[in-house]
Image (cartoon, rainbow, N blue to C red):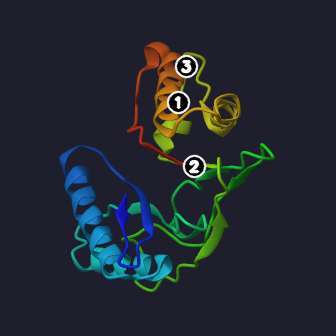
């Protein structure tokens, strides 16, 4: 989370290809570039375009970064967002109990030079829950080779929607650990939850 120059809450999640020290270094560079782009006051789609160009300048590996960025106006609940090939976040609507998957056209950062990113908009009403996650959350597998999947994540949101954001994160992580059992964690599991109060 960071604050944009115009006072909005910048919500960002990213995931890099690969593992180990090279991937960690690539992620550190990607995060630094994304933070700089936010500080410049660029709109989400522009931010992704500039970040992509900056990553490509020093791109000597074949790694890439998926990312999602949303700028949330905490007063109105309106969030402008763009995606660079990241898992679409889930927006749980508290009043109706319905779910939206927030998507916007765009490819991973660090792959192509000339890429256009599209900006979309969503509104978080009071009580609504926004869930951003990496694929390690939904692709966790159990002893029967089943994936945790989005449906189980949706069930947790519906069942525990009255909980705080932190409590929801704890519940998701506990459920994944119980689901995976002896399989354990095979990929990084990152989850960010925002609940509008």
Residue located at (45% from left, 83% from top): 46
Label total for image: 3
Q: Nearer the viewer, residue 33 or 2?
A: 2
Given this view, does label 2 or label 1 mark the residue nearer the observer? 2
Given this view, does label 3 or label 2 mark the residue nearer the observer? 2
Residue 150 place in picture, x, y as percent: 65, 39
Residue located at (54% from left, 26% from top): 141
Given this view, does label 1 or label 3 mark the residue nearer the observer? 1
- Mark 1 falls on what kind of element? helix
- Mark 2 falls on what kind of element? loop
Asked if marks 3 and 2 touch (Cβ < 8 Å), the reply is no
* Quadrant the N terminus occupies: bottom left
Q: Nearer the viewer, residue 64 or 69?
A: 69
Residue picked out by circle 3: 179
Residue 15 place in picture, x, y as percent: 39, 53
**Gap in Å between the C-alphas at discs 1 and 3?**
10 Å
**Gap in Å between the C-alphas at discs 3 and 2?**
30 Å
Residue picked out by circle 2: 197
Tell me, for residue 72, which label it has, or none.
Answer: none
**Gap in Å between the C-alphas at discs 2 and 1?**
20 Å
Asked if marks 2 and 1 touch (Cβ < 8 Å), the reply is no
Residue 123 place in picture, x, y as percent: 66, 64
Farthest right residue?
Answer: 96
Residue 36 place in picture, x, y as percent: 27, 74
Residue picked out by circle 1: 172
| Residue 161 found in image quarter | top right
């Amino acid at each position: 989370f960071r604050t944009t120059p115009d006072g909005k809450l910048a919500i960002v999640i990213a995931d890099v290809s690969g593992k180990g020290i090279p991937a960690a270094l690539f992620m550190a560079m990607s995060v630094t570039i994304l933070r700089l782009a936010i500080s410049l006051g660029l709109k989400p789609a522009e931010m992704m375009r500039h970040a992509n160009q900056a990553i490509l300048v020093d791109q000597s590996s074949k790694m890439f970064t998926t990312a999602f960025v949303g700028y949330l106006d905490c007063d109105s609940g309106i969030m402008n967002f763009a995606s660079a090939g990241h898992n679409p976040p889930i927006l749980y609507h508290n009043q109706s109990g319905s779910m939206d998957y927030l998507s916007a056209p765009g490819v991973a950062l660090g792959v192509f030079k000339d890429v256009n990113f599209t900006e979309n908009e969503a509104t978080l009403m009071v009580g609504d829950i926004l869930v951003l996650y990496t694929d390690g959350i939904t692709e966790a597998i159990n002893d029967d080779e089943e994936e945790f999947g989005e449906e189980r994540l949706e069930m947790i949101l519906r069942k525990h929607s009255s909980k705080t954001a932190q409590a929801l994160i704890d519940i998701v992580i506990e459920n994944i650990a119980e689901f995976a059992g002896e399989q354990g964690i095979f990929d990084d599991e990152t989850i960010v939850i925002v609940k509008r109060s």
